[in-house]
Amino acid sequence: MAGKAWGGTGVLGAVLVLSLASLGVGNHRVSVASAFMDPISRLRAQDESLYAHNAIQMARAGDWMTPKLLGRYFLEKPPLLAWLSGLSIKCFGVSLLALRLPVLLAGSLAATLVFLWLWETRSAVAALAGAMLLVSNRLWHTYSRLCMTDALLGTWVAAAIYCWARDPTLARRATFMAFCFFAAAAVMTKSIAGLAPLLALLVYRGLMRGRPRPSWKRVGQACLFVACFALPWHFYQLVVHPRWFWAEYVKRQIFSVGLNPPQLLSPEVPPWFYLKRLVLTDPVLCALVVLAAPSLWTALRAKKSSRDVVLVSWILTAVAVLMLFRSRNLPYLCLLLPALCIVVAGHSPWRSKGSGMLATAALCGLFFTKASFSAQPWGLPFFGEGQVESAPALRAYCEKGRLNELILVSPDDDFYSAVLPIPRVHYCFIDPVSSIDAYGRHFPYLGITVTADQFNRLDRWEGLFRERLLAWGLNSTQPVATAIVAASESDVLGIIQAHPESDFFLPAQMRSAAEGQAKSTHEAVPGTSGRFFLLALRSPQQRNASLQTPVPRYW
């Protein structure tokens, strides 16, 4: 059976290409950050703007070891996604396809791995069903089409566990090294969440008592090799940028955002949060998981196949990760989805060839039904779900070629402005309680986040912030005042008065007051139904007719 799998290169290539087509159609028309990361809560993929900015800057400016975001070091995540997307942009230029190509290929590879797993253990029909279930899943479809870490992480974990499933004791050198390589890639994609393959290995040892399993020595060797692959970048940052690494990677990302988030996206308890969205985004998959569960339980008790125990270890680990990270982030389900598709296709009620073919035909019909009802939470939105509301206005502003700094007040663009070639962008948040440290405790100290008063007197503060940034290893004031915290709308009016050469993008309810405040220095220009621009009458010399950096179509 294994020989059949390894010898079927043409079949696997066809599955990969078909998966790529199933996931990639229309992706070149889905604007940055416009997809709904959570179709139930209607939250857009804000993080894609940040990762896209990160990858573009890396491709253009270099410094591949240390990612940057809006002028500052960005060490909240390891850089594998930025490396891959940055390299793609370096090779093919700035475009939506180049930006997302690495993740799109990864999502397709995961479907191919599901196919291969089932082809080796069940049948070609079951393998085809498993791959179709994955590419037709709303969440996998969405995350495989975005420049985000989650589908990439899910693919590395699936690849590591597949290699291990072929050699449950990890005795062979090739499978052992492949397992370690993919596990390290998972760590370099999303930090401690990438430890899932190693955790699954420990769960497997507990479930396989009295049966062949990796020795503790082999588990230790796996941990050592994963560390050898993944730790050099971490050690580099710890030595070269120790303060940034500790403040962002350790304190903020792991212990704050991951384990104790300052702000929850949903008040729902984690089990209900994930189960509700899993059911609403793919009710068919959930129903089939329930039907397949008795067969899986019987196989697990019999322990005739080590792969079933590996599969259960994978599922238990993924669920544990979902419960451990308290930020209630729907993309974390990418760790679980490939395993659920294998469960359904490998332990489904249909057994005969005829019923399997009928089920495959039904899955084809389901795929086209989901594509036809793209607006539903379970639908497949191949051509997008509408732009971020402010995106067209910001793009039109960008194409004017103005060299003024732009200040977005109460921004609603999901950081779309960060991926446009605007000379400098500031984000002004109106916060009555003035919780300036809510955006990162080290940000106020370094001047990345400032109060309205500090921004109005920035010439007095900039020298101090420069010294602090230099002490942290950054010889630049570019990130100073990236975020501005205003206590009220009157503070915003004070900023407008103090910055006559800055452009503003403001909520419509502030138009009357803002125009009265700046009638001699600014001109109000329509933006969207809910926002308007306040453009400075004085401006640095304009660029010529064309932009120095054209914005790609549909960007």
Image (cartoon, helix red, strand yellow):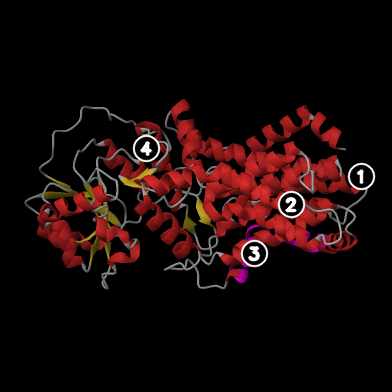
Label 2 crowding class (10 Å Cα cut-off): few <14, some 14-19, many 20+? many
Disc ID at residue 57: 4
Identify the magenta region: 271-292
Q: Which residue is mark 1?
A: 353
The kind of residue on which mark 1 rests is Lys
Considering the image in quadrants, where does the N terminus appear?
top right
Q: Give residue 340's quadrant in the image.
A: bottom right
Name the residue tied to disc 2.
341
Report the amino acid beneath label 3.
Ala
Q: Is residue 256 visible?
A: yes
Answer with the quarter of the image where residue 458 lies: bottom left
Q: Secondary structure at mark 3?
A: helix
Which element is circle 2 on? Answer: helix
Residues under labels 1 and 4: Cα distance?
53 Å
Q: How many marks?
A: 4
Circle 3 is placed at which residue position?
320
Which of the pair 274/508 is nearer the observer?
274
Would you say 174 lies left or right of 485 here? Answer: right
Q: Earlier in the sequence, mark 1 or mark 4?
A: 4
Q: Residues within 10 Å of mark 1 (few under 14, many from 20)?
A: few
Residue 507 shows in this picture: no
